[in-house]
Image: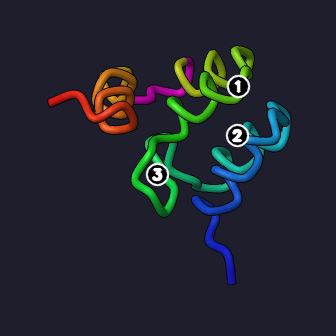
């Protein structure tokens, strides 16, 4: 059964900012990661959803994950 964090990742990738807000309000972690270890914030940008990224930012997401995840995806040490 998917967790709140799993559902958050799904809605981040889908770009549904209202569902993202609702899931965070219900207790999902803004710093949630998918199975591959990529953060919700990184996935929002990767999938072209700046409104979702802004929503995460306003709710206190760790912004440093962007660089870490970018390096990981592109094999940069």
Q: Which residues are magenta?
A: 58-62
Residue carrying label 1: 52
Residue 55 x/y as whole percent: 65, 23
**What kind of secondary structure does the magenta stretch mostly adopt?**
loop
* Disc ID at residue 43: none
Q: In the rendered picture of this protein, how many numbered marks are placed on residues?
A: 3
Residue 45 x/y as whole percent: 61, 22
Residue 14 falls within the magenta-colored stretch = no
Query: How far is mark 1 from mark 3, CA to CA?
Result: 15 Å
* Disc ID at residue 12: 2
The quarter of the picture where residue 56 lies is top right
Residue carrying label 3: 33
Between discs 3 and 2, the one toward the N terminus? 2
Q: Residues within 10 Å of mark 3 (few under 14, many from 20)?
A: some
Query: How far is mark 3 from mark 2, CA to CA?
Result: 11 Å
Q: Find out whether the residues at labels 2 and 1 contact each other: C-beta distance under 8 Å.
A: yes
Is 49 or 73 nearer to us in this picture?
Answer: 73
The quarter of the picture where residue 12 lies is top right
Looking at the image, residue 10 sits to the left or right of residue 72; the answer is: right
Residue 4 x/y as whole percent: 64, 63
Query: How far is mark 2 from mark 1, CA to CA?
Result: 6 Å
Residue 28 x/y as whole percent: 58, 54
Please report the residue visible at 58 percent of the width from the left and 59 percent of the height from the top: 5
Between discs 2 and 1, the one toward the N terminus? 2
Please report the residue visible at 84 percent of the width from the left and 36 percent of the height from the top: 16
**Helix, strand or loop at mark 2:** helix
């Amino acid at each position: 059964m998917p967790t709140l964090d799993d559902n958050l990742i799904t809605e981040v990738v889908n770009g549904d900012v209202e569902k993202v807000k609702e899931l965070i309000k219900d207790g999902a972690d803004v710093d949630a990661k998918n199975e591959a270890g990529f953060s919700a914030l990184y996935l929002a940008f990767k999938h072209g959803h700046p409104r979702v990224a802004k929503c995460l930012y306003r709710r206190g997401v760790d912004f440093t994950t962007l660089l870490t995840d970018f390096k990981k995806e592109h094999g940069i040490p």
